[in-house]
Image (cartoon, rainbow, N blue to C red):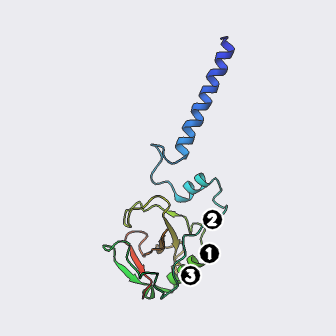
């Protein structure tokens, strides 16, 4: 093998190794992937779309206010406090209505995956939960109120930006 052929072989091996490492790191399985990466950034990388591109698909729609899901409402975690849907502020009910319709949402980050880093909700696979902003009157930004939904239809309410959660009971 000539030195020119060895050089080409070495470059080809290096390119393949680089592509393999890049694929591993971008897949989200890399050991050095920061845990605090923004959900928007990770969704952008994994979906291959820009942050201004298509929104992620909406989670399953929830039952209408006052309706009881088939078999009755059962909390996803009995240790988690619950709140009657009718006790939520009007802005939260507006957000729940938008979720049921699939949008459009007032904030670009509405509908992104909620990573449950604080582990305050039941543990589920990545991408199971999605978060939605609840407008806070008088706030100059998104505020601290959110509705977080699970892929099987459960809904959670937080007033303190994920510090505490209450599961929303649709029966009342």
Above or below 4: residue 131: below
Counting residues from the N terminus, which is met first, the one under dot 1 or under dot 2?
Answer: 2
For image coordinates 63% across by 59% down, the residue present is 51
Q: CA distance from mark 3 to mark 2?
A: 18 Å
On residue 103, the disc is: 1
Question: Label 1 to label 2, Cα distance in Å?
Answer: 10 Å
Contact (Cβ within 8 Å) of mark 1 with mark 3? no
Q: Pointer 3: residues within 10 angstroms few (<14), some, or many (20+)?
A: some
Q: CA distance from mark 1 to mark 3?
A: 9 Å
Q: Secondary structure at mark 3?
A: helix
Residue 97, disc: 3
10 Å neighbourhood of mark 1: few (<14), some, or many (≥20)? some
| The residue positioned farthest toward the front in the image shown | 71
Residue labelled with disc 2: 55
Give the class, few, some or many, for how many residues have Cα within 10 Å of label 2's Cα (few <14, many ≥20): some
- Is residue 86 found left or right of 103 in the rendered image? left
Secondary structure under the numbered disc 2 in the rendered image: loop
Task: Assess whether mark 2 and mark 3 are in contact (beta carbons under 8 angstroms).
Answer: no
Task: Report the residue that reaches farthest toward the left.
Answer: 79
Decide which of 152, 28 is in the foreground and name it.
Answer: 152
Nearest to the observer: residue 99 or residue 73: 73
Disc 1 secondary structure class: loop
Which quadrant of the figure has residue 158? Answer: bottom left
Q: Position of residue 151 (x, y in %)?
A: 49, 68
- From the top left corner, tell me how far across and down residue 134 is, in percent: 51, 77
Q: Residue at x 64, y 75 (%)?
A: 104
Lower sequence index among marks 1 and 3: 3
Check the picture and name the quadrant holding the C terminus. Answer: bottom left
Q: Position of residue 44 (x, y in %)?
A: 60, 55
Q: Quadrant of the N terminus?
A: top right
Q: Contact (CB < 8 A) between labels 1 and 2?
A: yes
Q: Is residue 86 above or below residue 164?
A: below
């Amino acid at each position: 093998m000539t030195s020119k052929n060895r050089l080409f072989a070495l470059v080809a091996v290096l390119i393949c190794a680089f592509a393999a490492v890049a694929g591993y790191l971008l897949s989200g399985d890399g050991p050095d992937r920061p845990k605090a990466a923004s959900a928007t950034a990770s969704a952008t990388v994994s979906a291959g779309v820009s942050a201004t591109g298509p929104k992620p698909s909406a989670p399953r729609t929830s039952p209408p206010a006052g309706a009881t899901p088939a078999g009755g409402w059962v909390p996803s975690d009995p240790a988690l406090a619950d709140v009657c849907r009718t006790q939520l502020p009007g802005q939260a009910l507006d957000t729940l209505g938008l979720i049921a319709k699939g949008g459009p949402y007032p904030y670009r980050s509405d509908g992104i995956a909620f990573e449950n880093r604080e582990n305050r909700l039941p543990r589920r696979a990545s991408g199971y939960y999605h978060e939605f902003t609840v407008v806070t009157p008088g706030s100059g930004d998104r505020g601290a109120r959110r509705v977080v939904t699970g892929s099987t239809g459960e809904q959670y309410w937080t007033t303190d930006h994920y510090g505490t959660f209450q599961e929303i009971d649709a029966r009342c």
